[in-house]
Image (tube, grey):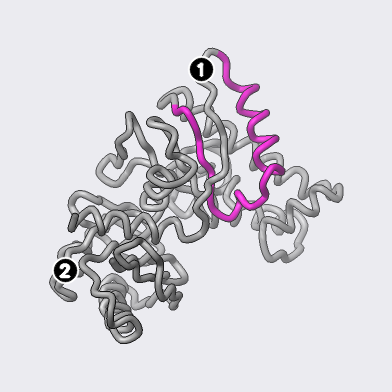
């Protein structure tokens, strides 16, 4: 199987053999050609297939798992919208199969990561669970009664749940979306706006907060408050047994999870208290989820 995970900056790809072993992990820049970006991505998938064929001639892929960001209709195989990568209503599944002549599954990058966690990782013990990936943005993968819930591609956009209607303007056009306050990117941006400093990542904000920096402490606390509020909303609406958190922000470990659990517990009353646990598969969860979906397609 070939799994390809398209990000706003890079494309990660890997070949998986029949035993599920990952081979030839690669990372290449995501081609950006305006309105032709989607087609450029599909041609890059073919280039990657040819590269894998040369490097691993004994492994013959039977299917492709293609993952992209934005609004994705898995069932229809359509990339509904990506404002960042400038496409709308692109039939990725059909176009990829026509070009490379292999069965192709098509999904959202975070939904695929969530599927890997649900089938093999930290979400495996649960039938009702939310997998949150917190990085530059925030998105979720929802499982209800053991089944993925996609809502035609619109479910799981937790990063665009509005926390503060008077809050920061989001790239989606709304104000006060969760990811404008609690994503790793927002944490850095909000600290820089308050101080004029330039940082490399959210870890530096956390380190400054631990050292007593007033601005960093405020930004980190506001992010935790926003995440806790979103999780309590999920608890009230979906009653998940657990919320599994992955992505770059989860690397803060107990410095994230302990205060987040405390805040959620304080906010909830009669509701089911979800376990809040770290993801277990790691940064290649999306690729693994894409490979699993591709294997399902030909099994």
Q: Main secondary structure of the magenta part?
A: helix
Residue identified by numbered label 1: 271
Image quadrant in which you'd find residue 69: bottom left
Which callout, 2 or 1, points at the residue further toward the start of the chain? Answer: 2
221 left or right, relative to 53: right
Q: Element at badge 1? A: loop
Q: Position of residue 100 (x, y in %)?
A: 18, 75
Q: Position of residue 26 (x, y in %)?
A: 43, 75
Q: At x 57% / y 34%, what residue is drawn?
A: 276
Q: Element at badge 2? A: helix
Q: At x 71% / y 54%, what residue is drawn?
A: 191
Residue 204 magenta-drawn? no
Report whether residue 47 is seen: no
Image quadrant in which you'd find residue 158: top left
Neighbourhood count class around disc 1 (C-alpha, 10 Å): few under 14, some 14–19, many 20 upward: few
Q: At x 40% / y 67%, what residue is drawn?
A: 22
Q: Position of residue 206 (x, y in %)?
A: 74, 51
Q: Position of residue 199 (x, y in %)?
A: 71, 64
Residue 268 magenta-drawn? yes
Neighbourhood count class around disc 2 (C-alpha, 10 Å): few under 14, some 14–19, many 20 upward: some
Residue identified by numbered label 2: 97
Q: CA distance from mark 2 to mark 1?
A: 46 Å
Report whether residue 125 is seen: yes
Q: At x 20% / y 67%, what residue is drawn?
A: 62
197 left or right, relative to 169: right
Q: In terms of depth relative to the viewer, which is nearer, 250 or 214?
A: 250
> Magenta segment range?
240-269
Query: In the figure, 219 relative to 44: above or below?
Result: above
Query: In the figure, 84 relative to 98: above or below?
Result: above
Image quadrant in which you'd find residue 220: top right
Q: In terms of depth relative to the viewer, which is nearer, 121 or 142?
A: 121
* Quadrant showing the N terminus: bottom left
């Amino acid at each position: 199987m070939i799994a390809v995970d398209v990000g706003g900056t890079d494309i990660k790809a890997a070949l998986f053999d029949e035993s599920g072993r990952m081979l030839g992990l690669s990372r290449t820049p995501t081609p950006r050609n305006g309105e032709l970006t989607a087609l450029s991505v599909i041609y890059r998938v073919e280039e990657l297939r040819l590269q894998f064929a040369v490097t691993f001639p004994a492994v013959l892929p039977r299917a492709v798992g293609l993952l992209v960001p934005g609004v994705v209709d898995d069932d229809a195989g359509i990339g509904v919208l990506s404002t960042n990568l400038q496409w709308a209503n692109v039939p990725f599944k059909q176009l990829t199969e026509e070009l490379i002549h292999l069965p192709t599954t098509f999904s959202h990058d975070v939904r695929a990561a969530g599927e890997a966690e649900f089938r093999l990782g930290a979400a495996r013990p649960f039938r009702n669970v939310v997998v949150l990936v917190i990085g530059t943005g925030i998105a979720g993968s929802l499982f209800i009664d053991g089944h993925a819930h996609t809502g035609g591609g619109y479910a799981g956009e937790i990063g665009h749940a509005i926390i503060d209607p008077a809050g920061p303007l989001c790239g989606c056009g709304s104000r006060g979306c969760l990811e404008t306050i609690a994503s790793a990117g927002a944490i850095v941006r909000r600290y820089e706006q308050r101080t004029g400093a330039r940082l490399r990542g959210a870890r530096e904000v956390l380190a400054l907060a631990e050292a007593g920096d007033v601005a960093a402490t405020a930004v980190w606390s506001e992010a935790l408050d926003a995440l806790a509020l979103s999780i309590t909303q999920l608890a009230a609406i979906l009653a998940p047994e657990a919320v599994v958190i992955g992505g770059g922000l989860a690397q803060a470990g107990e410095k994230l999870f302990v205060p987040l659990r405390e805040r959620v517990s304080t906010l909830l009353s009669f509701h089911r208290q979800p376990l809040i646990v770290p993801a277990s598969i790691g940064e290649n969860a999306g690729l693994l989820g894409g490979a699993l979906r591709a294997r399902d397609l030909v099994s």
